Image (cartoon, grey):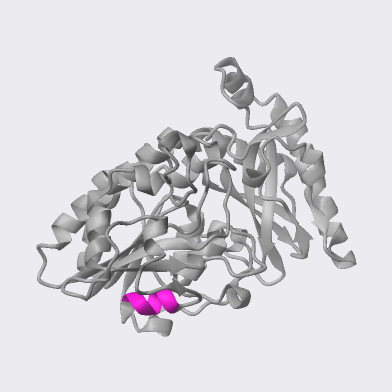
Amino acid sequence: MKYLIILGDGMADEPIAKLGNKTILQAANIPTMDMLAKKGKNGLLVTVPDGFHPGSEIANLTVMGYDVAKVFEGRGSLEAASIGVEIEPGEMAMRCNIICVENGKIKNHSAGHISNEEAYELVDFLERELGSDVVSFHKGISYRHLLKIKGGNKHVSCTPPHDVPGTPYADVMVKADCKEAEETANLLNDLILRSQKLLENHPINIKRKAEGKDPANSIWPWSAGYKPQMKTLSESYGLKRGAVISAVDLIKGIGVYAGLKPIEVEGATGLYDTNYEGKVKATIDALRENDFVYLHIEASDEAGHEGNVDLKLKTVEYLENRVVKPIFEEVSKWDEPVAIAILPDHPTPCRIKTHVADAVPFLIYKPGGEADAVERYDEDSAKKGSLGTLTGDEFMRALLS
């Protein structure tokens, strides 16, 4: 048996009046996912343990069966693994967004989904102007980058920018959790303010404003930590070889620490216009060579952050028609069976435009396996599933059993 997890980031939602009080999954036309739910077993998974922020880093670690209380060291350290940046002893890593600030408020967390080319020029510029023996900036993808601080103290409270659109940035700057972290907090806040002065009239932003686009006029560091200590999935579950496919450095970084091979797909953007067909081909090829593949699709989460119901509905139907259906049709022809699990990592309700910690619906389909009484794949139907509500590593063990 081979195993495939298809993760639709943030695709769970709440009932939406515009959709007749249905959720996105209930309103979407997803016959293949419904069929897999009907022929498989279903349930809910608590992906965000009590006391943790409902971030994708926490949720995806949980999906893979990790005890986040033991292994989580911040988002930046996970993303560093994806882009090949080593975190040395005594170094602290952080996610570093490039955001848009307007009239003193955070307009969005992505600088209008800035292109890689524009972002790379800005990160190189910031490294030249703000980099030092202590501070270094490293390029990621689009608005998602990495900041390293030598001697940094991770005990700082940072606000994820996607949680606070419309909030004055001065109200949500970095705060020290203890006296020992005050120097780190002050340094980070100084970098934010200096970046705003440097970026305001950068040629990239002059051009973006002239084109009616959001300027990329501030950095926003968050999720600090050191190098994590994680067992591989092979060590935990006996899997021989695995791969991870995602446009998002965070997910690829988790995969690296989990012992999975990151597979790059040209044109994978992390948005609704990503190269779905390329990801499908990469997944099928990876399943031929590996016994476990983790396929992550980001688009629904970004649509949720934008509060765009129509776009989020489209992304879920793209997942159905351009990912799940062609993969299922192909692997159904194979002699070796492929188990398929489908789930989000967390809900990203369009109404509030950010993540929540509610348990997420999942399906696990195994060719020739037993089925429960669930008829379709959505939040309410999953509550009736035979697997109930799972926590910790129970989802991975249910998939691999």
Nearest the eye: 224 or 64: 64
Nearest the eye: 21 or 94: 21
Q: Residue at x 44, y 66 (%)?
A: 44
Check the image and report above or below for 396 versus 375: below
Q: Is residue 226 rendered to the left or right of residue 375?
A: right
Per the rendered image, the range of residues in magenta is: 394-399
Label the magenta part by its dominant secondary structure: helix
Nearest the eye: 359 or 231: 359
Q: Quadrant of residue 384?
A: bottom left
Q: Quadrant of the N terminus?
A: bottom left
Check the image and report above or below for 236 versus 313: below
> Percent x, y for residue 118?
54, 32
> Percent x, y for residue 318?
31, 42
Q: Residue furthest top?
A: 210
Please give the count of numbered marks on the rendered protein.
0
Q: Quadrant of residue 372?
A: bottom left
Is residue 84 on the magenta stretch?
no
Q: Residue at x 56, y 32 (%)?
A: 112
Q: Residue at x 53, y 57 (%)?
A: 56
> Percent x, y for residue 214?
60, 26
Check the image and report above or below for 147 versus 260: above
**Residue 83 visible here:** no
> Percent x, y for residue 296?
39, 55
**Residue 25 visible here:** yes
Q: Residue at x 29, y 57 (%)?
A: 376
Nearest the eye: 384 or 219: 384
Q: Quadrant of the C terminus?
A: bottom left
